[in-house]
Every structure is written in structure tokens, then in C-alpha cells.
Image: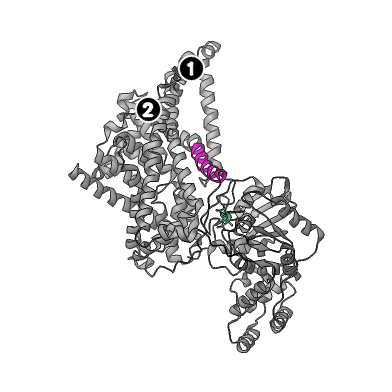
Amino acid sequence: MLEFLSDNIGTIVTGLLVLVIIIFAFREVKKGGCSEACGGDCACCKMKPTDTEE
Amino acid sequence: MPKSTHALKIALAGNPNSGKTTLFNALTGSNQFVGNWPGVTVEKKEGTLKKDSSVLVVDLPGIYSLSPYTLEEVIARNFLIEERPGGILNIIDGTNLERNLYLTTQLLELGIPVVAALNMYDSVKRHGDEIDISKLSQRLGCPVVPISALKGENTDEAINAVMKLIQSGTATKPCRFDGHIEDYITRAESLLPSGVPIGVRRFTAIKLLERDSKIGEAFSDLPDVSAIVAEMEALLGDDTESVFTNERYAFVTNNLHNAFVKSAYVSSSGKVDKILTHKVWALPIFAVIMFLVYYISVTSVGTLVTDFMNEGLFGEGFEFFGKEVPGIPVVIEEALENAEVAGWLQGLILDGIVAGVGAVLGFTPQMFILFLMLSFLEACGYMSRIAFILDKVFRRFGMSGKSFIPILIGTGCGVPGIMASRTIESQRDRRITIMTTTFIPCSAKLPIIALIAGAVFGGAWWVAPSAYFLGIFAIITSGLLLTKLKILSGEPSPFVMELPPYQLPTVKAILSATWERVWSFIKRAGSIILIATALVWFLSRFGFQQNEFVMLDEDSLDGSFLAYAGSFLAFLFKPLGFGTWQATVATLTGLIAKENVVGTLEVLYGGSFAAHFSAAAAYSFLAFNLLCAPCVAAIGAVRREMNSNKWTLIAVGYQTAFAYVCAFIIYQILCLIL
Ligand SMILES: Nc1nc2c(ncn2[C@@H]2O[C@H](COP(=O)(O)OP(=O)(O)OP(=O)(O)O)[C@@H](O)[C@H]2O)c(=O)[nH]1
Ligand SMILES: [Mg+2]
């Protein structure tokens, strides 16, 4: 076990790093429905549908 | 943000193009879109005051009156009436006093403390107009603060004046009309139920007398005042709405008397307009300008920097003052080798994430130059004139010039572009606009254009500009086609829009507008594009060989999961010239975000993309990806603005079918010529 860890330490650390980056990217994506720079914080992203008549 | 944390809510209200958003940005430190034409803001935006986070500032869409016609005007009015902010800062365009004060007379009726911010005071002074601030303030019955939102002059004083007025608790006095009209108002007021609060009774009474159709939504049990209305109309010989309009204008004119002296200043806009909006030359000039914008940004200057990005920074490396500097992939590769990282992880990082994200980021310089130029054209006032010039052309094809504003915003991103269609009154025009806005290349499509123009056509001068004109062509043709449909037939509504004056935009304004768009592009590359390329790498590098799950090497990607999925649909694109699984997958990932098309091609072809496409197929691929269904974010916006699943389906289906036919024709013709 320990041997496996020390042999693959580079892969494990890098893998974790990539995982963290991907998680961050996911959080960024989840923030915004609107691709404008507000990143999902503006009222337009939180907007409810306006009362357009059908 | 939860409402309860804000002690105070202050709304910025005023005419369109009076500088509300400019002031909002200055007060809150946000970077909301400012443009030199009416109807830029179509949704209320909230932000906290830079110097006092307990104060919430709300930027509203511009309104000419409290009788709304279009969707974004409804948003502004509903906010003022239903949410009742603690105070209103009424932004007045000082170079257009009469018209702006018309709205002020209505805001004063809401029973909310109002301060008038006399904006564009820099222009007022430059023109030599004279405004007696204290006289004006006294006559309007509310504080007046001269400001320049653009230069940041007196902006704090304006907001302080609102807070002081709120704290003092003095109610704003509404303006008084002619004696017998006041009698009618008093009579209508006395009929109102007790549920209507003191502050808004006068406003409600006037709205009832004006036969306002929407006031009933705000309060229930409103009385029937038709008898009073009939009496008024019989006596005054005019409908009540006009009576009140006239009264308000009379009030404004009387009060401006002696308080305002207009100079004989003639703006230079007229002279410039003689050329730029000339009957014959306007369109050719516009075409040349747009040609130059795309040619310079994508093909000439942009390519220089982008080559450096793609081959240097995100490639082998570059020379810096005679020193060899390795590119990012080289550095990362070395680091991964040294750390003895497993081959598959190296592949994911280098051939997947770095290659895909790098390919997209490589186009940032072109993006920057493009938006620098577009922001300038927008801010100086040229673009809003194009709406007028194009109105004549659009009208022949059943659309109105108003559709150009969403298209203009759509060059940045289709989502706000689609939302900008709210300024269009007629539902038919609005639907057509929503369905066609995303034909114009948005910033996310720029990398596709630049890639094909550069890699396949070797930077030929016509490719990048042709993408823009293809978009315009698609919009016009669609106008023609869609108005033939029974559900969308009818005349385009007349187009009236106020022309803003030409002005030299500030460097800061241009840079911040450009940066906003470029930064959002970079953020997308680091988020959604990164995830998508990682996924594409994964699905394209693994598969079954002899019934065994294996990692594939570069040359046998045809056996991957993605290849199976792609080949399944690839036949659809055979007639368009790009029926390979790679091109199919790239097109599909483009539905998540259009930049993905470039990222995916890079991951799947590893840089040898150009070798797999004939010129005809490449241009057809470009045309299809520019015109077909937009990304999910834009489809979401279509759904929101249409407020109907049926219409969303019609829109997306139409766009894809149109793109297919277009790409087919282009491919067949190019095959014949080339
Ligand atoms: N000269 C001058 N121009 C200004 C000033 N404030 C704003 N502007 C310009 O006026 C134009 C309109 O500004 P916006 O802030 O977008 O106006 P808005 O009131 O938000 O407009 P809508 O969102 O359409 O209602 C822009 O071109 C600004 O640069 C000012 O104090 N002086
Ligand atoms: Mg605005």
C-alpha cells in the first residue's frame, strides 16, 4: 500500500489537483445561466419569466 | 442577496439613455452594459452602494412615463409601484429637460421621496445652456442635484441627498394641475377603498381616470369612475389620457420658464449624419465599416497576436529578446514527466484540457480587438443610426429596424441579445427578432470563424467578414420566410427611436465594456469549456478493443465511445460535406457552448484539423455552426422570452433547418467552383 502510494505520488497529487480544478470549473458553471460576465449574480440570471402573453 | 440585510432601497429611474446605468456602475462599482441608445437596460439590476453596503441601489430600464407599452417598461413601473423603494433618484438628461421632466411629474405622484439628478451636466455646460438649479428645485418641490455620471462628478452628493430626504421623513409634494382637473381627481380619490395607502391615492385616482388597464393589478376593489371620466371628456373635449398629458407638459413648461435658458448651440451630429445616414451611401459605408472591423480584428492584426498565442504561448514556445521561452504545454509536459505522472493523466491534462482550453483562449486577442472596435462604434452613437438605416431594408422583408438593437447586443452574447427584444412592442416583431438574433456571430462563435479563416483558408481576407454578412443575410432571409407563415404574418410596426447625439466615448468606458466581454470569454474557457474538453478527451480516448475496455492510442480513436456515438449521426452531415464523427461531435458539443467546437476539434484532431477538411466542407461547417441552434444558455433565454415551449421548439427547429439548407447550398456551390 505504502509502496504503491510512494510510487505513484506524482499521479495521485496531479490527479487530485485536476479534480479540484474540475470541481471549481463546475461551481463556476453552476453559477451562471446567463453567459454575460455577471457570472450568475445579476438579476437577469435570477430572473423569473416575464409576463409575456401566449 | 437576502432583502432583509438592506436597510434602504433606492431606485434609479428616468428616461431611456439618460445615464442611469452609468450612474449605477459608478455608485456600486459594477460593470453593467452601457450603450449610447435608448433601451439598453431591459431588466432591473441590483447592487449595493460602494460606500455603504446597507443601501441597495436598483437600476431600472428607462421609461418615458408610468404608462408602459413595452415589457421592459412594465418591469420598471411594477418595481416602483409594487415594491415601493424607499427613495427614487430620478436621472434627468439635462440636455433634454422638457421631455425628462414629464416623467418627473409622474414620479412625484408616487408618494416616495424623489431627488432629481440633473445628469450630463458636463454637456449642458459645454452647450452653454443655463439652468437655475435652485429655482428648478423650488418649483418642482424636490431637491435637484447637478451631476455627471460619466465623469463621476457629484454622484455621491446625489445619493446623499436621497438618503437625507428619506431620513427627514418629508413627503414629496405632487405637482398640481388646473383647478377643475384637481376637482375631478379629488372626486375619484374619495371613491377609492381604504386599502389604497395615502401616498398612492392621488396616483391611483389619476391612473383610473386615464383608464389605465394595469392599475387594477396593483390594487383590488377599485371603484368604477367611468361617470367622472365621461363628464371630464364631455367638458374638455378630449380623452382623459391626453388631458393629463397636456396638463403635465403645461406644468413642465411653466416651471422651466425663467429657470432654463437654452443656448443657440447646434450639435455637430447633424453634419456628420448627412454623410453617415445618407440615402445612398449609408449602407455601403456600414458594410465597409463592418468589413474592416472583422478584417482587422480576426484576419490582420488579430492573427499576429493569435499566432503568437497558439504557436508560442500555447505551443512550442517563443523567442523573447533572443531568449527561448518554452510554451505552456512544454512546461507542463516537463513537470508531469518529472513527477512521473501516469500516461493517461498526462494525456488528459495535455491533449485534453490544455489543448482544448488553450485552443479557445488562443483567440482572446482577436476577441479583444473586435470588441474594442465594436464598443467604440456603439458608444459613439453610430450603431444606433444603423438601426435607422437598416429599418428601410428590414421593412421590405417584413421586419423593423428595432430588431437591429438585439442583433447589435447579440454580437457580444446571444442571451442579452434575445432579452433586448423586450423593447419591441409588437409581439409578432418580437418573436421574429428572438428567432433570428442568434444568427449574428456572438463572441463564442468568433473562435470558430478565426480557426477556419486561419487554419483552412490561410487568413484569406474575405472569410471572417463574410461570417458577419452571412448572419445579416440569414436574418433578412428569415424575415422574408417567417412573415410568410400565417402565425407570424402582418405588417412590421412603425419604428420610432430617439437618436442619441454623437459623442466621443471615454477611454475608460470603452476599455471596461471590452474587458467585460473578454473576461466573460476567459471565464467560460476556464469553466464550461474545460469540463467539456476533459469529457471529450475521456470519451474519445477509451473504448472497447476485442471486447476489452482499453485506452486507445492517438491513431485508433475511431474505436472510441465518442466515435461510435458520432458515427451514428454523421450521415446527417454527409450532404453538407463534413460527415465525419469528429465534426459531428464538435457540432454537438457546440450546443453546450459554441467555443466547444474549437476545443473539441483540437482534442480530436490534435492540431491537424485543416488536413481533414476541404475548403468547401470547412466553409459549410462554419456556416452550419454559425446558424444552427444556439447554445443551451441562449435556448434558455429564448424559452424565457417567448414564455412558451411551443415557440421555443419552433425557433430552434427553424434555426437548425435554415442552417442545414444554407450549409447544403453553400457546400454544393463551392464544390462546383473550387
Ligand atoms: N456627456 C455625458 N454622457 C453621459 C453621462 N452619463 C451617461 N452618459 C452617456 O449616455 C449614454 C447612455 O448611458 P446609459 O447609462 O446606458 O443610459 P441608461 O439611462 O441606463 O439607458 P437605458 O438603459 O437605455 O434606459 C452613454 O453613451 C453614456 O456614456 C454624463 O454625465 N455626461
Ligand atoms: Mg441602462
Q: Label 2, secondary structure: give it.
A: strand
- Residue B443 counted in the magenta span: no
Ligand 1 visible in quadrant: bottom right
Q: Left or right: B65 with respect to B671?
A: right
Amino acid type assigned to the residue bearing label 2 in the image: Phe
Task: From the top left corner, tell me how far across and down residue B67 is, in percent.
Answer: 59, 70
Work out whether mark 2 precedes mark 1 in sequence or the reverse, and give the earlier one: 1
Residue at point 43% right, 29% down? B309
Q: Where does the C terminus of chain B fall, quadrant-wise? A: top left
Q: Label 1, secondary structure: give it.
A: helix
Q: Left or right: B175 with respect to B269?
A: right
- Please, is residue B537 above or below residue B24 in the view? above
* Mark 1, residue position: B335
Task: From the top left corner, tell me how far across and down residue B158 is, in percent.
Answer: 71, 55
Q: Nearer the viewer, residue B209 or B104?
A: B104
Q: Give the range drawn in magenta.
A: B506-524
Res B221 seen here:
no
> What is the distance, in whole Å, between disc 2 and disc 1 at their CAs?
25 Å
**Residue B320 location, quadrant:** top left
- Please, is residue B66 above or below residue B409 in the view? below
Amino acid type assigned to the residue bearing label 1 in the image: Ala
* Mark 2, residue position: B542
Q: Name the chain under label 2.
A: B
Q: Name the chain under label 1.
A: B
Task: From the top left corner, tell me how far across and down residue B170 is, in percent.
Answer: 80, 64
Residue at point 52% right, 55% down? B36
Residue at point 24% right, 37% down? B614
